[in-house]
Amino acid sequence: MDEPQEDDLLRERAFQRGGGLDLSGFVLNVEQAPKSEEEEATEATEIDAAMGEIASPFGEHTSSDGPTDDVVTGLAVDGERRLGQGLLVAMVVAYSALAAYVGTALPPSIAAPGLLVLGGLGLWLGERWIPRPSMRLLGVTWVIISMKILYGFALDAHHWGWFDALPDSGLGLGAALLLLVGLNVALAQRHDDDAIAAQATLILLLVGSAAGGLYGELGVVVMIAFGTMVLHGMALLRGTGNLASLGIAASYLWVGVHALSNDWVVLGLHLVPLEDDVLTFLLMATITGMNAVMATRFAEHENWFSAALQAVGLGRPGLWAVSVGLGMIGATLSVAANREDVGYALAQVALLLTAFSGSYLAVRGVAWTSLQPWVLWIPSLLTLSVVPLAALSVEVGGLSVYALHAGLMVACIAVVVLRHEASVSDHVLWMGSIALVVLLTLLVPSGAEDTGQPLLVAGVLVVWGGLAWLALRRDAPSLAGTAVLSPWVWAMLFVGDFDDRLLSSDIVTTELSSSLLTAFLGGSMFVTYTVNLRLGDTGVNLGRNFTGGTELSARIRDAGSLDLWSAGAALAVLTVLVSLLGEGLPLELGLLLLICPMLIEAVVAFLGGRRHHPRRTLTLTGVASLMVVWNLGHASVVGFALLCSVGLLIVDAARRRARVEDLDELAGMDVDEGGLHALLLGFLMLLALVRWLQPLVGSVDGLTLSNDAAALGVVVAVSLGMFGRREVLSGRLITNVLCALGLLVAMLLVSLEAELLWLQGALGLMFVGTGAWLSVQGEMRSALQTTARIEQRRSEHAAIEARRDAFVRRLGHADGATMHRLDNTTDGTALDVADPAALRRTAERATARRPKAQPSEESLDGLEHQPTVLMAFIGATSLSGAVWAWLGGNHALALAATALLVTAFIGLARWSADRLSMPLPQVLGIDAPVALGLAGLVLVEITGRVGGFVVVLGDQLHLLAFVLGALLVASMHVLGRDQLGLRLPAFADALLWTLVAGRIVTLFVGGEVPIPLNVDPFSGETVDWILPMLVLEAALIGLILLHEWVEGVRRQRDLPDQRGAGGRALSALLAVPLSFGPAGILALCLGFRRGVIWRQPAVPLLTAVTLPLAWAALVHWLDPSLGVSLPGLIPAALFVGGLSLLVAAWTVFDERPLWMAAALQGGHVLLIPAAWSGFGLTGAVVALLVLSGWSWIIGILVLRRSWRVIGLADLLGAWTGFGMALIAGASANTVLVMLVITVLLLSAVTWLTQRDADAIAVD
C-alpha cells in the first residue's frame, strides 16, 4: 500500500531541518569525535533508584566557572509558590487556633453553632473552589481547615460532657473521631487529594495513642498496627507515594514516642509507655515488614518529603530513601529507649537492617528469588522463634535470645550484601557507615568505668578504614570525603564533649584513656592522608548549591578552600588542639600530631607532589600553635616545624618557577616567597610574644623558659638569615620588614624574661645587621620604583605624542579641529592615537572634587604635593591645644588660638603647592591640611568638655569659638580657588560634619554639651548661651541655603548630579541634631524637595522619617515660650507614618512605582516605634497587622515579591507580639479580636494570591 502524500512532505521537511548529513548511514569509515571525560563521566553516572538524586557533599574537583543556578536562585524563582503554600499552612494554623479558642473560651451555646458554621463554610468553599484549577489549592486548604474544626468540635463535645450519657464517654469520643476519619477519607476520595487524606493518617495514630488510656499497652500496640495497615491500605488504594512515605515515617515515630514515654501527658493525651519487650518487638517486626514492602512498592513514586528536600537544595532523594530515613529517626527512639539492654537494642537494629537491606536490593533490581531465603524466610523464622524463647527467658551461651537473634540476622545481612556488593551505591555506603558509627557510639558502653572503650575505638576505626579502602578501590569522592572528615567530626562531638557544650547535656558518655585517644587520632591521621594523597582534590561541596551564587561563595569555591585536603587538615588540627588542651592527650604526641599536617604538606610538595595553597595549612597550624603555647609552652618546637615547612616550600617554589614556563600553572601554589616569609616571621613573632606573656607554662612537663627561649632564638636566627638572603627577590619588603623588626623586639622581651645575656647580645647584633641591610634595600627599592614610575609615565606620554605627530603628518595638516578630535576621540578610527590612561584621568577629573591639574602638568596627572612637615605642624598644634584645654585652660581661647595657627599653616601649605603648580591631596573632597585642621579643632572641643576640671553646661561660649574657628579653617578650602561648584558643597559638608562630631562625640564620651532635640535657646545668659545658640543656628541655616543655591545653579545649567542621594540626604540630616528646630525643619524640607526633583526616593524617605524629630526639637522650647500645647513626637510620627501609607496607596493607583517602596518603608520606620511608645504592645501589634495587610496587598497588586515577604514578616512579628501579650495576660476579647483580624487578613491574602497566581508566577 502506498504511503500518504503527507508522509513524503514530512520527510522532506525533516531532511531540510537536519543539521547536516549523517555519514554513518553510508558505507564509510567515519570515526566519531571522542567524547570529553566530563561527558563520559556524565553518561557513566548511574542514579540509584532507591536513593534518588541526593546531593552528595563531595564531588570531583572542577575548574572555576561563573555563577550558576543555586539555592538562592531557586528560592527567587520558586519562592512565590512556596510562600503561597506557607500562607495556606499559616491559615490552617490560624483557623485551628481560632477554633480551639472559641471551643474553650466561649460557652457551648455560642461555640457549637460557630464551629459547625465555620466547618460547613469551609466544606462549601472546598466544593466551590476545588473544581477550578487556579483555586484548587485554596479549596483543599479550606477542606483541611473544616476537618480540623470538626475534629476539634468532637473533642469540645467530649469536654462539654455531651458523651457522658453513654456507658463510656471515651468510647463515644473514639467512635465520633472514627466517623470523622471516615468522612475525611471520603472527602479525600471525592476531591482526589492526598493532603486531605494525610490528615486522617495523623488522627488515626492519635486515636491509637488514646486507646492506651482505655485498653493499656495492648490497645496501643493493636491500634498502631491497625492504623499503619489502614494508612498503607489508603496508599495502595490511591496509588500515591505521599501517603506511603507518610505512613512509614509516622508509624515508626509513634512507636518510638511510646517506647520513650514515661507516662507523658501531651495536650491531655496520655502516652502509655511500651514496657513489654516481646510485645514491642513483635510490633516493630510487623511494622518493619509492612514498611519495607511499601518502600519497595512505591520506590519510584513522587512524594512530599522528596520535593521538600529538593526545595532546600539537598537533591531529590527517592521515596525509599526519604521514607526509610525518616522512619529510622523514629526507630532510633525505640532503640535508645532500650539502650541499657544491648542485646535487645541490637536485635531491633538488626531487624531494621535486614528488612530494608532486602528492600533496597530489590529496588536496585536484584532478583527477588535470590533474596528470599536471606531476607524473608530465615529472618521470619528467627523472629517467630524469639517469642516463646524470650517469654521463657532462655539464654544460650550466656547470651540473651535477642543478642543471638541480632547475631544471626547480621550474618544474613552480611551474606546478602557481600553477594550483591556491586549493586550497592556509594550513597548507601557512606550514609550506612555514618549510621553504623552512630549506633556503635549509642550501644557500646564507653564511660570512664566501662570496659568497652577499646571495642568502640577499634570498631570506629575499622568502619572508617574500610570506607577509605572502598573509596580508593572505587575512586569514589563521596566515600573519600566521609572517610576523611567523619573521624574528626566524631572525635569533636563525642570525645571533645561538644554535645555537652552545645546542648548542656551529654548525649552519650564517651571517655577515652590517653593511650586510646592517641591511637584513635593517629589512626585517623593515617586514614586522612592515605586518602588525600590520591583523592585530595575531591571537593567538599557542603555549600555546593550556593556556590557561585554570590561573589563570596564563588571566591570560596574557586580558591579551593573546601577541597578535601584543606578540610581534612583543618579538622585534624582543630581536633588535636581540643584533645591536647582538654582531653588528656600526651604533650609530646599531641605536638607531633599538631604539626603533622603542616610537615606532610611541605614534604609532599618538596618531593614533587601536590602543592595547592599550602599557606592555609601553615596559617591554621600557626593559629592553633598560639593557643598551645599559651597553655603549654614549647614555642621552639612549633617554631622549628614552621621553619622546616617554610624552608621546604621555598626551595620547592624556586624549583617550580624555574621549571614552569607558563605562569598560569603556578596559580594557587603559593610560590610567592614574600608571602611565605611574612607568614613565618609573623607567626614566630606571635609565638615569642605569647611565650613572653606566659613565661611559666611548660616548665613542669617540658621545656623551661630558658631552654625554650634559646632554641627559639636559634630558629629566629636561621629564619632571618634565610629572609635576608632571599627577600631581595620577593615583593613584600615593607610587610616583611615590619614582621622582622617586630620579631626581634618580641625575642628581646623573651630574652629579658629568661635572663639570657648571650641571647640579648645576639639579638642586638641581629637587629643592627638586619636593620642596616633592610634599610639599604628599602631605600634602593623605593628610589628605583619612584624613578621607574616617572620614566614610565614620561615614556608613555612621549609615545602617544609621537603617534599623534605621525597621524597629523598622514592627514597633511594640523588645524584646531583636528587636534580637538584627537583630544576627545572616542571613535575607533583614531584609537591608535588615543591615550587610555589620559582619558581615564580626564573622566576622573570630571567627577572629582579636587581641581583639575594645570595643562602643562597633564602628563604627570595624579601626582600631588605632600606637605608632610606642615601637616605635622598642624597635628602638633592641634595636640597642644587639646592638652591646654584638657589641663584647664580657657576652652574658647584654646579653640580660637588653634584655629588661627592651623589656618596659617594651611595657608603655607597652599602657597607651597601653588608654587609647584601641583594640587594638595584630598580627603573626602577636602584638602588634606584643611581636613586635618578640622579634625584638630574637634579634638580640642572634645578634650575641653571632658577634661578633669569643672565644666558648666550653661557656659557655651566655647561653642561660639568652635563654630567661628571651624568656619575660618574650612574657608581655606574655597577662598581664592576655582571650581566653586564642587568646592562649596564639600566645604558645607565638611563644616557640618565637624560641628556634628564636636557635639555627638563629646556627648557620647560624657562631655557637658546640650542634648540634641532638647535645647531651649532662650533659657540662659545672653553671651554664654543665647548668642552661641543663635550663631550656630544661623550658621546652619546659611550652610543649608548655600547647598540649595548650588543645587539651583547646577539645575539651571543642566549639570549632572554631583552629590547623589546619600550625600543629599546626609546634608539634610546633619543639621537636625545641632538645630533647636528651624534649621532642621528647613534642611529636611529642602532636602525632601530636592530629592523629589532629582527623583531619588531615598532622600524623601530619610527626610520624612526624621521630620518628627526636628518637630519635637521645635516644640520643646516653643510650647513654654508661647504657652500652648502642640502635638509632640509620637503624634507627629503617627501622622507622617499614616501619610506615608496613603502615599503608597496613591503610587499604586496612579502607577508611580518609583516612590512606592520609600513610602512603605517610611510607614514601617515610623508607625511601629510610635505605636509601641504611645500605646504599648497592643498598639505595636495593631500597627504590624496594618502594615502587614498594606504591604502584602500592595505586593500582590503590583507584583512585588519583596513586599509580600515583608508583609509575611510583619505578620510573624505581630504574632510574636500577640504571644507576648497572651503571656502578659491579655483579655479574652483582645485575643479573640486579634485572631479574627489575623484569619481575615490571611483569608484575603490567600484569596488574592490564588486568584493572581499566574501573574505572580511570572513575577
Image (cartoon, rainbow, N blue to C red):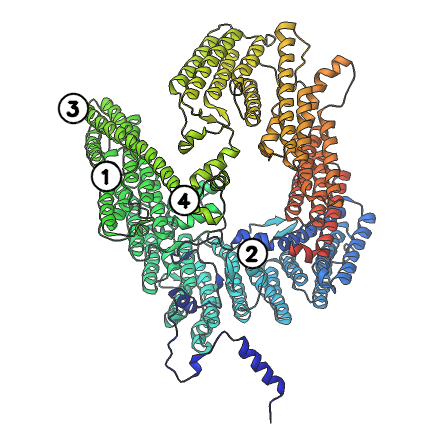
| Up-down relation of residue 873 to residue 241 (above or below) | above
Q: Secondary structure at mark 4?
A: helix
Q: Sequence order check: which comes first, mark 1 or mark 3?
A: 1
Identified at 71% across, 55% down, the residue is 1252
Residue 1210 - label: none
Residue furthest to the left? 758
> What residue would you read off at disc 4?
809
Q: Alpha carbon of mark 3 to alpha carbon of mark 4: how far?
A: 75 Å
Query: Quick one: label 2, few (<14), some, or many (20+) residues within 10 Å?
Result: some
- Mark 4 and mark 1 lie on one chain; the one further toward the N terminus is 1
**Dot 4, how many residues are within 10 Å of its Cα: few (below 14), some (14-19), or many (20+)?**
few
Task: Find disc 1 in the rendering and name its residue.
Answer: 643
Mark 2 — residue? 311
Q: Is residue 87 left or right of residue 877?
A: right
Determine whether the residue tagged by mark 1 lies in a helix, strand or loop.
Answer: helix
Q: Disc 4 residue type?
A: Arg
Separation (CA) of disc 1 from disc 3? 22 Å
Question: Which one is in front in this view, the residue at disc 4 or the one at disc 1?
Answer: 4
Q: Amino acid at mark 2?
A: Ala
Instruction: Give the mark nearest the N terminus, 2 or 3.
Output: 2
Q: Is residue 1127 left or right of residue 880?
A: right
Up-down: is 239 above or below 542?
Answer: below
- Label 2 sits on a secondary structure element that is helix
Quadrant where the N terminus is found in the figure: bottom right
Q: Amino acid at mark 3?
A: Trp
Give the distance between the C-alpha atoms of the residues marked 2 and 1, in whole angstroms: 49 Å
Mark 4 → mark 1, Cα distance in angstroms: 64 Å
Disc 2/disc 3 C-alpha distance (Å): 68 Å
Q: What residue occupies the far bottom of the structure in this picture?
A: 1
Residue sitting nearer the eye, 213 or 229: 229
Q: Residue at x 56, y 81 (%)?
A: 12
What number is the disc on residue 758?
3
